[in-house]
């Protein structure tokens, strides 16, 4: 695991532990990479509640209550799905903060409207407004996933 990512996870853990908060992750394109980074930190069980790896649409529906109509209208890689994923992660966990990621890591799967590297990240503290952002990362599958994990951790720190 990348040292910068581990350091971000360590910083996030320090903040969450100080605030008595826990985090949950809802991941698609990163395949559990955010949860892996978090659990690299000794003692993370004090601030990491759970991770959902919802790679398939069926998993998004079943585990996070993403609506079929949202998937049909906007596609799995969309701000709408990222928002429903993060809200589902909070609803189905004991976490105070959640982060979700959905995107196209490549090398295929992209389109003119959503090229490879298109990633949506949403994050939300319980009781607060959901926030989200779209990124367009350049690079291969490994670098897109790495950048997504980094940005997700950074957003949780902000």
Image (cartoon, grey):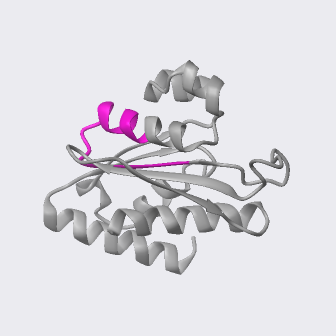
Indicate the quadrant containing the C terminus: top left, top right, bottom left or bottom right.
bottom left
Residue 40 appears in the figure: no
Q: Position of residue 65 (x, y in %)?
A: 44, 24
- The residue positioned 74% from the left and 69% from the top of the image is 138
Q: Is residue 99 above or below residue 154?
A: above
Q: Quadrant of residue 41?
A: bottom left
- The residue positioned 51% from the left and 38% from the top of the image is 80
Residue 83 located within the stretch drawn in magenta: no
Nearer to the camera, 86 or 73: 73
Q: Is residue 67 above or below residue 129?
A: above
Residue 91 appears in the figure: yes
- The residue positioned 57% from the left and 75% from the top of the image is 2
Image: magenta residue range:
86-101
Q: Is residue 38 above or below residue 77?
A: below
Q: Is residue 50 left or right of residue 70?
A: left
Q: Position of residue 139 (x, y in %)?
A: 77, 69
């Amino acid at each position: 695991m990348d040292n910068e990512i581990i350091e971000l996870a360590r910083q996030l853990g320090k903040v969450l532990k100080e605030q008595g908060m826990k985090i949950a992750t809802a991941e698609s394109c990163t395949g559990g990479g955010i949860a892996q980074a978090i659990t690299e930190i000794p003692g993370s069980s004090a601030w990491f509640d759970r991770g959902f790896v919802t790679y398939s649409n069926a998993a998004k529906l079943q585990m996070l209550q993403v609506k079929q109509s949202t998937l049909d209208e906007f596609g799995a890689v969309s701000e709408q799905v990222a928002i429903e994923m993060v809200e589902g992660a909070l609803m189905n966990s004991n976490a105070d903060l959640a982060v979700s990621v959905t995107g196209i890591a490549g090398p295929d799967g992209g389109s003119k409207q959503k090229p490879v590297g298109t990633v949506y990240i949403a994050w939300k503290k319980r009781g607060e407004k959901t926030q989200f952002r779209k990124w367009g990362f350049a690079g291969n599958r490994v670098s897109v996933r790495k950048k997504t994990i980094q940005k997700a951790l950074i957003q949780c720190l902000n």
